[in-house]
Image (cartoon, rainbow, N blue to C red):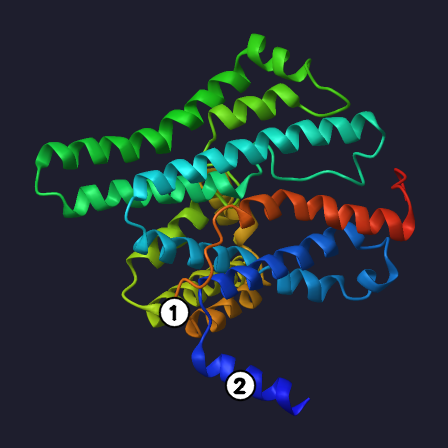
């Protein structure tokens, strides 16, 4: 026990590198998925579901922190963005196929991954990197033509995908085609179209998460990054408190309808997500092991692993249970 405590104290003194923060984030993500899948079904999970969800809420800000610091160090940021997009496409395609296969086998509610189509965090991280690259061009380039192209690029990626999806959903032909092509209750063609034209406004985490990533990227050091992270989530918590206390339902509706995904952030429990600032303060600036495709593979795989665990523990899910 003493040796374990000494190792822990040494690790805290030496700090955490990218690889260790990534592992911590993946652990938190797995605990959140376990709470979502096992709540009310697995006895052990049922009595600790809330604690697991709060622990899991640290995952996204930690992933974002690791991503922006890796982007800072990479020598070829365009290749990094292409790698993210390729990973998002591969994850989306494989998950769409696996979800359909498990649905055909009658196991969709047990074995499925929520990272296909529009629910893919990798696409959010991809857009985060694209915004950062364009903002760098806008702020640092001396050429006004490059500044103009960067500005138009920011406007284009903010508007064009959203307007395209608005057109698709409001056009009877496309809307009917996508809805009529569901397989085993899964909108396969809609998911595939999302992979080709991901919408940053409605991606997982949405614009608020992209904004957090941009702010963390431009922060001077880890102390500023930790402060920004804590302030970001405390802002949403305080906003939720004010809306509730002063009965500002119109403001809540306005923010939810104007800023997609904003309603997911206006919550009291965001104060717990702000604790992600603590591991950030332990960051030692070292990359650690090269994770490359490890996270990209584990991200969709952990859904199936947790689903398999719940399936083995309590048997197949029955609608209405």
Q: Residue at the bottom extreme?
A: 2
Residue at image point 60% right, 34% down:
116
**Can residue 260 be seen in the rendering of this structure?**
no
**Which residue position holds label 1?**
227
Residue 24 sits in quarter: bottom right
**Which residue position holds label 2?**
9
Residue 119 x, y percent position in the rendering? 58, 38
Taking the image as shown, residue 151 lies to the left or right of residue 13, namely: left
- Mark 2, Cα crowd under 10 Å, few <14 / some 14-19 / many 20+, is few
Residue 238: image tag: none
Taking the image as shown, residue 214 lies to the left or right of residue 257, namely: left
Q: Residue at the top extreme?
A: 173
Residue at image point 57% right, 67% down:
272
Front-most of 264 and 134? 134
Dot in front, 2 or 1: 2
Residue at image point 62% right, 11% down:
177
Q: How many marks?
A: 2
Front-most of 291 and 150? 291
Taking the image as shown, residue 224 lies to the left or right of residue 267, namely: left
Where disc 2 sits, the SS reads: helix
Residue 112 x, y percent position in the rendering? 73, 38
Distance in Å between CA atoms under marks 2 and 1: 24 Å
């Amino acid at each position: 026990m003493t040796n374990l405590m000494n190792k822990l104290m040494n690790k805290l003194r030496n700090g955490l590198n990218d690889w260790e923060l990534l592992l911590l984030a993946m652990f938190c993500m797995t605990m959140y998925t376990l709470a979502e899948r096992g709540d009310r079904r697995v006895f052990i999970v049922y009595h600790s579901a809330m604690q697991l969800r709060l622990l899991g809420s640290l995952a996204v800000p930690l992933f974002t922190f690791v991503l922006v610091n890796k982007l800072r160090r990479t020598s070829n940021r365009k290749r990094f963005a292409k790698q993210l997009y390729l990973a998002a496409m591969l994850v989306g395609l494989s998950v769409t196929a696996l979800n359909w296969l498990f649905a055909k086998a009658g196991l969709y509610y047990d074995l499925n991954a929520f990272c296909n189509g529009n629910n893919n965090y990798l696409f959010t991280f991809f857009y985060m990197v694209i915004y950062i690259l364009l903002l760098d061009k806008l702020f640092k380039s001396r050429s006004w033509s490059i500044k103009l192209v960067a500005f138009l690029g920011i406007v284009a990626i903010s508007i064009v995908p959203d307007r395209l999806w608005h057109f698709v959903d409001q056009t009877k032909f496309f809307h009917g085609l996508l809805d009529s092509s569901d397989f085993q209750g899964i909108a396969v063609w809609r998911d595939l179209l999302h992979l080709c034209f991901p919408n940053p406004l409605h991606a997982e985490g949405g614009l608020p998460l992209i904004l957090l990533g941009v702010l963390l990227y431009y922060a001077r050091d880890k102390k500023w990054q930790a402060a920004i992270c804590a302030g970001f989530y405390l802002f949403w918590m305080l906003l939720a408190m004010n809306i509730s206390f002063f009965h500002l339902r119109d403001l809540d509706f306005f923010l939810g309808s104007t800023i997609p995904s904003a309603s997911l952030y206006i919550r009291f429990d965001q104060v717990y997500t702000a604790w992600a600032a603590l591991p950030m303060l332990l960051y030692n600036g070292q990359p650690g092991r090269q994770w490359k495709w490890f996270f990209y593979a584990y991200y969709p795989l952990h859904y199936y692993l947790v689903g398999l665990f719940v399936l083995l523990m309590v048997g197949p899910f029955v609608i209405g249970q």
